[in-house]
Amino acid sequence: MHVIDSHTGGEPTRVIIEGGPDLGGGPLADRCALFAEKFDHFRTMSVLEPRCSDATVGALLCDPFDRTCSAGVIFFNTAGYLGMCGHGTIGLAATLFHLGRIQIGEHRIETPVGIVKVNLLSPNEARIENVESYRYRHNVELDVPGVGAVSGDVAWGGNWFFLVDHAPAPIALKNLSSLTDASTKIRAALVDAGMTGENGAEIDHIEFFEKPEHGDAHSRNFVLCPGGAYDRSPCGTGTCAKVACLAADNILAPGELWIQESVVGSRFKAQYRIGNGGKIIPSITGEAFISGDTKLVFQDNDPFRLGIA
């Protein structure tokens, strides 16, 4: 299996460019379902230990169903499949440029949840216009065992998020354990309360916010991803969900800049335009850097050939 590794704001992406499953040529949502049903071992082989870390998002490069798109992609991680991935799309754009498959300029990337517009600004910087995003529930109150009373918003930014404006501990690397523990308990409390996204979708990302460390940013965040790893980047879809909440509260105007800082200090620049039916169309700008061009080997007698599940 041939993969290209990159990181966006510190968060790794692994793009499978050769040796992935043959999913045919149908719509990306159908191919993602087929991937999960018949070929999930390709996911575990490529992003689980011992070949990878739990922070990595995998991306299967596909031919697009919509021929106006430069590429199609299915994102996944150690826990399962992602509808969209903001940092991963920026990483994919840098990877496609590295491979000579796209040039500087505007492109369309097809994902299982819709088409994402990408403007590659340089070999390492890209601005993506995400799928329509929106706040689904406002000021949801939870009593979380071991944490206490928590209030937050449920929002869609390409994945489902529970966004909490007050972190249970300062958002810093030294507090990763306590932030992760609180996030895990909040996610469990959402399940126990029967709180979901639209159409019963699981809320699988938890996002905390506080004031930024640097004065030119607007907010600092911590995001717990579905597999239990924290996001090193400010989280692309999480930043889009945040912007949707800011727009709903009339705090951020269309076209106004929002700089989101991550727990490691990396940042995304975000804006939005008005979409349909009260939804917004957010865009984020970030940098990605190629970190590896690798051939993964799977020996038949390797007891962990399919990954450590």
Image (cartoon, grey):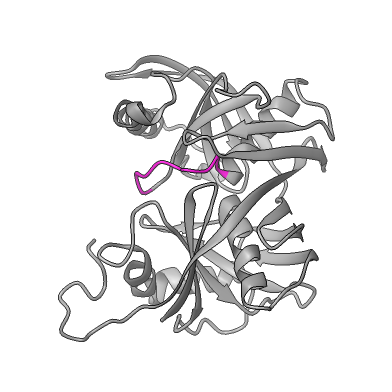
Q: Which residue occupies the extreme top position in the image? A: 149
Q: Residue at point 76% right, 71% down? A: 103
Residue that appears at 33% across and 73% down: 41
Residue 67: percent from left, percent from top: 77, 78
**In the image shown, does 12 or 223 lie closer to the viewer?**
12
Seen at 49% across and 85% down, the residue is: 22
| Front one among 23 and 253 | 253
Left or right: 95, with 225 as reference point:
right
Q: Main secondary structure of the magenta part?
A: loop
Task: Evaluate whether residue 286 shows in this view.
Answer: yes
Q: Is residue 307 above or below residue 271?
A: below
Marks counted in the figure total 0
Can residue 192 be spotted in the picture? no
Say which quarter of the image contains residue 218: top right
- The vertical placement of 164 against 63, above or below, is above
Which of the 4 quarters of the picture holds residue 186?
top left
Q: Which residues are magenta?
A: 227-235
Q: Is residue 256 left or right of residue 88?
A: right
| Residue 119 on image: x %, y % | 77, 58
- Image quarter where the N terminus lies is bottom left
Q: Is residue 245 magenta?
A: no
Image quadrant holding the C terminus, namely bottom left
- Please give left or right for residue 300 compared with residue 285 in the image: left
* Residue 164: image location, x then y, percent: 51, 23
Q: Position of residue 13 (x, y in %)?
A: 49, 60
* Residue 230 in magenta stretch: yes
Q: Name the residue at 35% across, 78% down.
A: 296
